[in-house]
Amino acid sequence: MRSNALARTIVGLTAVAGIAAGSLATASTSFAAPAPASQSVVSAHPFSALTTQNFGLNTAQAENVQRFLAEYWGYTDGIDGQLGTNSWKAFQRCLAQYWGYTGAIDGDPGTNTIKALQRLLKDSYGYTGAIDGVAGSGTQAAFKRFAG
């Protein structure tokens, strides 16, 4: 599983470097061509973005969350302090069980995931804001308290 993630990361970084190099090679100081009206991208290999969303947690705090998820919610990836897709899938299982999350267990910490997280944080970790699905400063502060 980790070698697949490493391979996707390397491919992604290579693509970004290639795009950046191509953009620099074709750039002109006197004229930039306008962007085409519409673009169509066809990919032979579907991929997903390798992103993490720690919502203000530092690495040590995110590692604490991952240990909690590993112990109780079926998280099996490494304890690396990066709350990625599999961390959020495990967290969504917790939120679905106890905090009213009804969305897909897809690892995307979107609005519904954040609303359920806010309900958890309001119950026991001092969150006083609205259940609005926005991970603002109040949500992040309470999430840090949750992460210990």
Image (cartoon, rainbow, N blue to C red):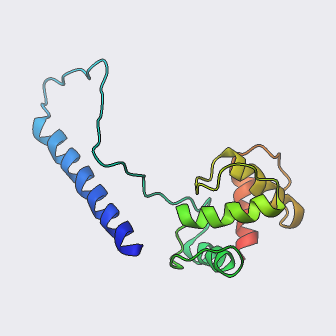
Q: Residue at x 82, y 53 (%)?
A: 100
Horizontal arrangement in the rendering, residue 2 relative to residue 43 (left or right): right
Figure check: 20 above or below 144: above
Name the residue nearer the viewer: 8 or 81: 8
Q: Residue at x 58, y 70 (%)?
A: 58
How far across and how far down the image is residue 142, in percent?
A: 76, 63
**Quadrant position of the N terminus in the picture:** bottom left
How far across and how far down the image is residue 113, in percent?
A: 70, 52
Q: Residue at x 18, y 39 (%)?
A: 23
**Quadrant position of the C terminus in the picture:** bottom right
Q: Residue furthest front?
A: 44
Q: Residue furthest top?
A: 37
Horizontal arrangement in the rendering, residue 74 relative to residue 82 (left or right): right
Q: Quadrant of residue 124?
A: bottom right
Horizontal arrangement in the rendering, residue 73 relative to residue 12 (left or right): right
Figure check: 67 above or below 58: below
Q: Residue at x 61, y 62 (%)?
A: 88
How far across and how far down the image is residue 7, in percent?
A: 30, 66
Figure check: 127 above or below 36: below
The count of marks equals 0
How far across and how far down the image is residue 119, in percent?
A: 83, 55
Name the residue nearer the viewer: 27 or 95: 95
Q: Residue furthest right?
A: 123
